[in-house]
Amino acid sequence: MLASWRIKNFKAWHDSGAIKLAPLTVFFGENSVGKSSLGQLLLALKQSAATDTTPPQLLNLGDAQSLIDLGSFAQNLHHGNLSEPLAFELQWQLPQAISLQGVAQQHAISVDALRLEVSIMADSAQQPVLESICYTAYQQEQTQLSVTYHSAQPDALQVQIEQPSVQKYRLPVADAACPARFYQLPAVQQPDAEFIQVLAVQTESLLADVQALAALRDGPKRRYTWMGDTPESVGRAGQNVAAAILAATAQQRTVQCAAGQPEQPFAQGVEYWLQQLGVASEFSVRPVAEHPDEYQILLKNHAAACEVNLADLGFGVSQLLPVLVQVLYAQPNSTVWLEQPEIHLHSHVQAGLADVLIAGTQAQDNNQPRNVQIIVESHSEHFLNRLQRRIAEGVISHTDVALYFCSRKGTQTQIERLDVDTYGEIANWPENLFGDEMTDIAARAMAAVQRKRQQGR
């Protein structure tokens, strides 16, 4: 699970500062202030780690066929600043503690959290080149070890052990070439320094478990094709929503829809939340008789209604369904990034989404916590009001929620954490969090009074 995230010199952000993340993290804010770019870089790192190219790419910013397409490296630098590096930090809790082998002459170190700090410069051709990589390993929040590569000293890694006493040493590298990927330390001459490769593997595992759903999801289709595959997620645009449901059903996956409830078959879990949100009373995905690889998503608005195809319902249902499925479909220890899940939804359903996401972070799998983390970009005050209510009711602890407000000050984007107490109250409510509602109400009332006077009423 991601514990913190920081970016420097990327798009709207000169420096985001360390953003502490919780099981449920929500970013609010004005349009075009950089909320989306927080997730965009994370997705670029995911596809960089997953891309198998020869030679390997340091940083894959994508193209039209990629998970995300960010254009050229120079286009992504803050105000086009080529003189400063694009830098980022990721810190995360490991699903379970691991032992780093081969540290300081066969010494092994047990760690349960890692931090990765990376700095990437633009070369004379405005292409990315690695400046530095630094890994820090922790055990119960105590620093155990740090390993640093810097392009100014490419012949060795600098290793520092912190516990039980400080010890520093150098690991000569096997090849002075710059690391090929942003997270991979170069191979070293010491053959038993296994921990160097383990750090890269842990980063790949973290990024592989990041899933994202864009604000603009695919429109409803009358038929969906499924060839028996198991998709990684519902897809960036929700295009795999039917395949995800069918794959989970074929695997006999069960889901817990809310804390304390028994697990139930996957499709029934989707139906449960559609019912709770008042969107549909029945839900199924069934094959088309004459085309065995094609399927229909069928729903009923209410118990007495006729069953209809998803394409014949309101557009909002097609936008909601990928959100519900992705939250339930996410594998244990995943991080799910949702962009404006409330788009095209009635205010009642927007509020209900808070309950869906709370349940998603609290659900268990075979009586074990799934530890699914959900990060949301939102403009919905209905969502926030319901979330505050659930904190006040004790459904979710305020310590399991992190709320942020992004705004612009001059040419700079800034971010502020909202202080939420155990009763769901926000101590530092930002000005214009959801617009100046009271100004509009007062102006409307005054305009009505003036018009009535003019009309002699």
Image (cartoon, rainbow, N blue to C red):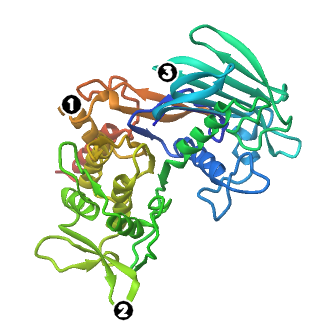
| Residue type, label 3 | Gln
Dot 1: within a 10 Å radius of its alpha carbon, few (fewer than 14), some, or many (20 or more) residues? some
| CA distance separating discs 1 and 2 | 53 Å
Name the residue beneath numbered marker 2.
Answer: 290
| CA distance separating discs 1 and 3 | 33 Å
Q: Earlier in the sequence, mark 1 or mark 3?
A: 3
Element marked by disc 1 = helix
| CA distance separating discs 2 and 3 | 58 Å
Tell me if I can see residue 443 in this picture. Answer: no
Measuring from the top left, give residue 57's x and y in whole percent. Answer: 75, 50
Task: Check if mark 1's residue and mark 2's residue have beta carbons within 8 Å.
Answer: no
Q: Earlier in the sequence, mark 1 or mark 2?
A: 2
Task: Check if mark 2's residue and mark 3's residue have beta carbons within 8 Å.
Answer: no
- Viewer-nearest residue: 38 or 81: 38
Dot 2: within a 10 Å radius of its alpha carbon, few (fewer than 14), some, or many (20 or more) residues? few
Name the residue beneath numbered marker 1.
Answer: 392
Name the residue beneath numbered marker 3.
Answer: 139
